[in-house]
Amino acid sequence: MKNLLITGGAGFIGSNFIKYILKNYPNYRIVNFDLLTYAGNLNNLKEEEDNPNYIFVQGDIREKENLENLFKEYTFNYIVNFAAESHVDRSINNPAIFAKTNTLGTQILLDAAKTHWQKRKDEQGYPIYRKEVRFIQISTDEVYGELDSEEYFNENSPLKPSSPYSASKASADFFANSYYDTFKLPLNITRCSNNYGPYQFPEKLIPLMITNALQNKKLPVFGDGMQIRDWLHVRDHCKALDLILHEGKLGEVYNIGGNNEITNIELIKTILDKLNKSKELIEHVRDRLNHDRRYAIDNSKIASELGWKPKFSLQTGIDQTINWYLNNKDWWKKIKNGKYQKYYQKMYENR
Ligand code: NAD
Ligand code: TYD
């Protein structure tokens, strides 16, 4: 039996990864450690609740004591850190919580892993760790900043984060790198493009547009809508993380992209067509501050080293995602009609 700590497992990508691991690794026990912020939702994992290989612990990666208690109770082989504040618009309204959770929280978690896994020190003072342990820091392509030409981000592209969100994630990457260089903590950093798929919180572009269209509400397009994103289906992402966790070269960064570049406006029109809804629902609103125009990922490293490539085309992925939101109205209506409604309204008015 191997023990896997997933932080932020009640969020979108974390919950999909937990489902993926439980299905593919029956000899793994998962501890999902999540603070349950507005974005954490235990309904994402209703089907897993009774699985004997799944345990939920509520806690905060920023609290050293929370982590010490957790590490006293379980001996982990792997740690995958999804816990974060993840929405760019929220980071513009309130940068401080992004610095605290994404940067400081990651550093505290890295430190706890170092202490937990260290067996002893070598003669020069470098820690020697237990065998077969690994920390994966989930980062984002947004740390590279924006691209305005035909270029692609590769793992050597300079980090030029432009929003408080991406700045907090880039800072966490620097900390992770420093724990590898200074303390030899066995780790990888992964930088993926925009994810989409089941269980994504309806503040992000694709689920917001699908659910607003289904409710005949306006679809807010920031600025001209000509910004380009590269969409990665969350299941393709999970497969890539599986390969990195088990076969990635320690200390390396891996970019993970969907090979699905599209402008926001084109994507929104595709969603409306598929739902048979009128384009009149589209409403151009004031642009996001300092809105990055284009992100695009060069996948060649993970393709050549680990044999990964995305399986979902955007067409298949969007069809599957729309079907999921059509079949799971209770899931998203509970969010949209609950406390979130007030918060969304406030954030939107503050833009
Ligand atoms: P999410 O917002 O859906 O989930 C984040 C989870 O972290 C929530 O369950 C929340 O309760 C938990 N959390 C927040 N603060 C915490 C804390 N202090 N301690 C413990 N748990 C805490 O985010 P997501 O979309 O699933 O993203 C997961 C990771 O992937 C994040 O690190 C994000 O930066 C990264 N990422 C996401 C995307 C994307 O398109 N969604 C793209 C690139 C990278
Ligand atoms: P988002 O899902 O917030 O992800 P990110 O900002 O991390 O890329 O947004 C994706 C794109 O969609 C981004 O260019 C901003 C745009 N967008 C809108 O035009 N309207 C919206 O209501 C939202 C949430 C995003």
Image: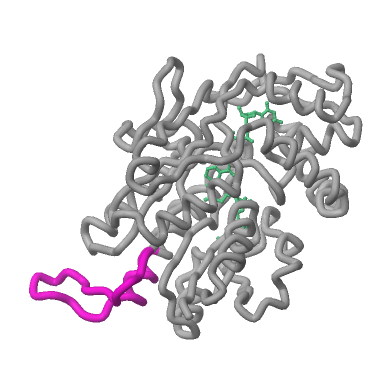
What residue is at 43 percent from the left and 68 percent from the top? 78
Q: Residue at x 44, y 43 (%)?
A: 191
Q: Is residue 307 left or right of residue 208?
A: left
Q: Is 122 placed above or below 313 here?
A: below
How far across and how far down the image is residue 109, in percent? 43, 65
Coordinates of residue 132 in the picture (x, y in percent):
33, 71
In this view, which residue lies farthest toward the right? 216
In magenta, the rendered stretch is 110-134
Query: Is 113 inside the magenta-drawn segment?
Result: yes
Please tell me which residue lies in front, 155 or 245: 245
Along the line of sight, the residue nearer the viewer: 92 or 10: 10
Measuring from the top left, give residue 188's x and y in whole percent: 36, 54
173 shown above or below 56:
above
192, 322: nearer the viewer: 322
User: What percent of the width, then of the height, locates residue 318?
Assistant: 71, 35
Residue 342 visible in the picture: no
Depicted 159 relative to depicted 51: above or below: above
